[in-house]
Amino acid sequence: EVQLVESGGGLVKPGESLTLSCAASGFTFSIAWMSWVRQAPGKGLEWVGRIKSKTDGGTTEYAAPVKGRFTISRDDSKTTLFLHMNSLKTEDTAVYYCTTDSRLRHLGYYYYGLDVWGRGTTVTVSS
Amino acid sequence: DIQMTQSPSSLSASVGDRVTITCRASQSISSYLNWYHHKPGQAPRLLIFAASGLQSGVPSRFSGSGSGTDFTLTISSLQPEDFASYYCQQSYSTPWTFGQGTKVEIK
């Protein structure tokens, strides 16, 4: 069964750091591109960032609100994705989801889609 | 960044109703448009990719259409498990951006 399980959420104070993990199983993690998406209380979904597979360069991209504070990394030997969050702000309070950022084929062309999701882990930033 | 605007923000409907949700992009995104279903406490689910491609395992009552800047998600006959929030998302260029969501509630 294809599965993603996030962990590491909790209550932290503004300015502190936290690392989230996402354990993957049921698919070839090493070739998967992976994204983090978050949902603040009462708000919609917001893309946080992405990491490509090492074979595709392993590069990362981030949304503007987290760029320079958050870092995405991966350990393919442990099929685990990480989100390292520094200098946390109250506005980072959200449920954080990891998701596969997959190439999907339709009518002969390839498109990206976030097709496997975990259930999320909650991060609360409050003094 | 590409802005995505959904309408309506919420709607009330009954089981068996036909429901339509629209999504507009701030610039042309060709067919790089996905739709997701999300219930509180659950993992979001990809329904439609490439504007009209039905993701594997998704019931055929869901369909998508559109290209360029205007897109539509249609549920042909609403089922009890379909009461949830729906989001469009552009995959034309990063940063990926989502619409603000449409909450489908029971009438």
Image (cartoon, rainbow, N blue to C red):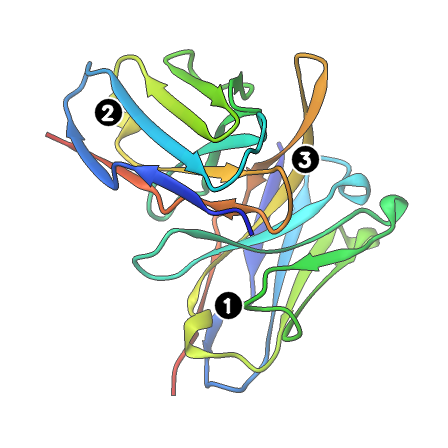
Q: What residue type is labelled 2?
A: Pro
Q: Are marks 3 and 1 on the same chain?
A: yes
Residue named by callout 1: A9
Label 2, label 3: how far apart the Cα atoms are: 29 Å
Q: Do labels 2 and 3 share a chain?
A: no
Label 1, label 2: how far apart the Cα atoms are: 32 Å
* Residue sticking out furthest to the left: B107
Residue B85 visible in the snapshot: no
Pinpoint residue A49: horizontal percent, then vertical percent.
63, 56
Pinpoint residue B15: horizontal percent, then vertical percent.
18, 19
Tell me if mark 3 has few (under 14), some (14-19) or many (20+) residues whose alpha carbon lies within 10 angstroms of its own: some
Residue at 46% x, 45% y is B98
* Label 1: element kind: loop
Q: Which amino acid does label 3 sit on?
A: Ser
Residue named by callout 3: A102
Q: Which residue is nearer to you in this view: A67 or A118?
A: A67
Label 3, label 1: how far apart the Cα atoms are: 25 Å
Residue at 14% x, 22% y is B14
> Callout 1: residue from which chain?
A
Which quarter of the rendered picture does the C terminus of chain A lie within? bottom left
* Residue sticking out furthest to the front: B27
> Callout 2: residue from which chain?
B
Please give left or right for residue B80 compared with residue A62 in the image: left
Please give left or right for residue B97 compared with residue A30 in the image: left
Q: Do the residues labelled 2 and 3 touch (CB within 8 Å)?
A: no
> Callout 3: residue from which chain?
A
Which mark lies nearer to you, 2 or 3? 3
Residue named by callout 2: B80
